[in-house]
């Protein structure tokens, strides 16, 4: 049982970070930025709107994100992606690739607060559908690559959504993390409550939490 504990912790933490229930007031949801100071259990985060102080508590949970790539996104992969409307498909702003043990985390399609150049963003968590072949044209319709943009259909409870992932979009995977990673210079993503913080997503190996 012990070896499954990190997965359980990550699953619980991300379920709180990326669920419809948490997205009722997206403009006030998340803090994104870089740790500028740590003093005891107080962490100051330099965000785009100014410094934010977050309190770490004994129940605060830590989730890491590490670099990933399009090669990690295949049929049956469960992903989460912040996205905005586009021509023919929603355009991904970022992608989080979940391991099989965390499939289903935050499943659905709901409002999100990632800045998107004036567009309202959404978070869509679901499973990449298998390509569908037409007997008339014998063409792939739910998983298409055009140049360096990959287009695929994401399936979730209650619907599907066509997502285009352009070249250069941040793609990360999930990794274990500890409080020891919360140091000045660390890139973090935090959802309320902040005093104490329920969980913190922190970048590892050069990754920045893109959600």
Image: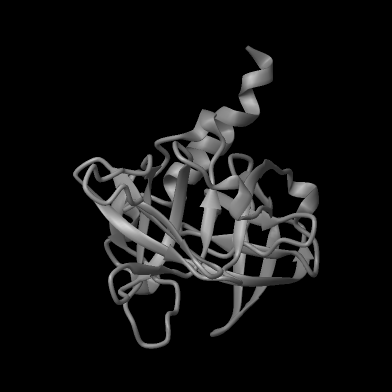
Which of the 4 image quarters holds residue 83?
bottom left
Most foreground residue, 68 or 184: 68
At horizontal 48% and vertical 40% (from top left) the residue drawn is: 77
Q: How many marks?
A: 0
Asked whether, in this view, residue 4 is left or right of residue 116, the answer is right
Asked if 116 appears above or below 11 in the picture, the reply is: below
Q: Position of residue 65 (x, y in %)?
A: 66, 52
> For the N terminus, which image quadrant?
top right
Residue displayed at 31% across by 67% down: 89
Q: Residue at x 30, y 43 (%)?
A: 133
Name the residue furthest front: 136
Q: Give percent across and percent down for residue 202.
A: 67, 56
The answer to whether residue 21 is left or right of residue 148 is left
- Where, by quadrant of the figure, is residue 172 drawn? bottom right
Residue 11 picture location, percent across and down: 51, 36
Q: Residue furthest top?
A: 1
Q: Quick check: 127 above or below 44?
A: above
Q: Residue at x 52, y 31 (%)?
A: 100
Where is residue 143 drawn, in percent x and y?
40, 52
* Nearer to me, 209 or 185: 209
Please state if 150 lies on the left or on the right of 207 as rendered: left
Q: Name the foreground residue: 154 vs 144.
A: 144
What colour scheme governs how the chains and residues are painted in the rendered image of this protein? Answer: one colour
Q: Quadrant of residue 107?
A: top left
């Amino acid at each position: 049982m012990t070896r499954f504990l990190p997965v359980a912790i990550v699953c619980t933490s991300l379920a709180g970070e990326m669920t419809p229930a948490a997205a009722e007031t997206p403009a006030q949801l998340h803090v994104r930025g870089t740790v500028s100071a740590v003093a005891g259990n107080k962490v100051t985060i330099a965000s785009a709107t100014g410094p934010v102080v977050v309190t770490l508590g004994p129940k605060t949970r830590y989730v890491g994100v590490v670099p990933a790539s399009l090669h990690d996104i295949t049929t049956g992969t469960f992903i989460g992606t912040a996205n905005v409307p586009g021509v023919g498909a929603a355009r991904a702003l970022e992608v989080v690739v979940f391991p099989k043990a965390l499939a289903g985390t935050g499943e659905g399609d709901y409002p999100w607060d990632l800045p998107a150049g004036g567009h309202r963003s959404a978070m869509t968590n679901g499973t990449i559908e298998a390509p569908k072949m037409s007997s008339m044209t014998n063409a792939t319709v739910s998983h298409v690559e055009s140049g360096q943009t990959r287009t695929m259909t994401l399936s979730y409870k209650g619907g599907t959504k066509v997502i285009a992932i352009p070249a250069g979009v941040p793609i990360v995977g999930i990794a274990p993390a500890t409080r020891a990673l919360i140091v000045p210079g660390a890139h973090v993503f935090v959802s309320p409550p902040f005093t104490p913080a329920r969980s913190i997503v922190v970048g590892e190996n050069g990754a920045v939490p893109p959600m």
